[in-house]
Image (cartoon, rainbow, N blue to C red):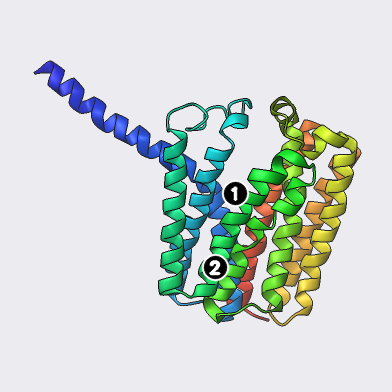
Amino acid sequence: MAERVETSHRIPAGLKGLASDYLTLTKPPIIMLLLITASGGMFLAAEGIPSLQTLALVGAGGALGAGGANAINHFLDQDIDALMSRTVRRPVASNRISPMSALAFGIALNVAAFFVLAYWVNLLAASLTLSATLFYVLVYTGWLKRNTPQNIVIGGAAGAIPPMVGWAAVTGGLDLPALYLFSIVFFWTPPHFWALALLIQKDYQKAGVPMLPVVVGEERTAQNIFMYSLALVALTLLFSATDAVGLVYLASAAALGAVFIIFAWNLKREHSVRKARHLYLFSLLYLALLFAVMLADSVYRF
């Protein structure tokens, strides 16, 4: 009797752990940020609150597509993940989930994402989501990441597609504001990711990944971060010249941008782990708040 009770307790624990590992494959924090940017595109396109059905379907399809891409990333990066302290405990790198299981899981999620978006939203939104996955896993993870220090500059295009998906889901097409949204996330990605790279550059060096700090050093990386930060903030302000956003957005973008530039300037002056961490953490908050403001601006337009 005692043995049966003990076994009955172990099985749920094992299933819970397995479910947790599969959830980890999808990288939920990244999905949340991508869904925020996609929502910004939907609210701006709708000039207010889009239908709850569209929000739910794009959220589901976007989460499935992004989660699937991230799972395939675990499969492709299993060798370098096993060498870096930040990633060595990932499910595939630590052999808790087999590489082929992760690959099959990622492909299945992307098939589901395409079906959900193509059937219930529109083909353009589905195609954009699939293109983001293909670009991320084939172009960035499979090629750029291991071969050029400009990997994240070009590869960042994949993460910039969700707001275009949101716009396309509402309008059925792509217009100038959607391209602005794409460009904002595109220019946000290098300073965000290079700040992280400064924090874990020893890991990248050990794994042989040519991230910018490993190749050109901390000083030039900080200079590049500052230049991209200036371009990013200029672009967010230029966006206010369109009819897509109003004064709520403009004031918020200016305030958030000023803080972003201050953090980037501080890192340029002092190439320390502390300054890099400040910029990295604020960059996450910055993008989330910037797109949250777009939601508010679309509802309360002045």
Q: Quadrant of residue 196?
A: top right
Asked whether the viewer can see residue 295, the reply is no
Q: Residue 171, position in %: x, y?
A: 56, 81
Residue placed under numbered mark 2 in the picture: 127
Q: Residue 264, position in %: x, y?
A: 83, 47
Estimate how packed mark 2 is, as few (under 14), some (14 to 19) or many (20 or more) residues with alpha carbons within 10 Å: some
Residue placed under numbered mark 1 in the picture: 137
Q: Secondary structure under badge 2? A: helix
Q: Is residue 17 left or right of residue 164?
A: left
Q: What residue appears at the point 36 percent right and 39 percent down from the top-left corner?
A: 19
Q: Amino acid at mark 1?
A: Val
Q: Is 55 drawn above or below residue 134 in the view shown?
A: below
Q: Residue 247, position in %: x, y?
A: 73, 76
Q: How many marks?
A: 2
Q: Amino acid at mark 2?
A: Ser
Q: Quadrant of the C terminus?
A: bottom right
Q: Residue 81, position in %: x, y?
A: 59, 31
| Alpha-carbon span between mark 2 and mark 1 | 15 Å
Q: Is residue 163 left or right of residue 214?
A: left
Estimate how packed mark 1 is, as few (under 14), some (14 to 19) or many (20 or more) residues with alpha carbons within 10 Å: many
Q: Is 193 drawn above or below residue 176 in the view shown?
A: above
* N-term-proximal mark, 2 vs 1: 2
Q: What residue appears at the point 15 percent right and 17 percent down from the top-left corner?
A: 3
Q: What residue appears at the point 60 percent right and 49 percent down from the top-left corner?
A: 137
Q: Is 173 drawn above or below residue 102 in the view shown?
A: below
Disc on res. 266: none
Q: Secondary structure under badge 1? A: helix
Q: Quadrant of residue 199?
A: top right
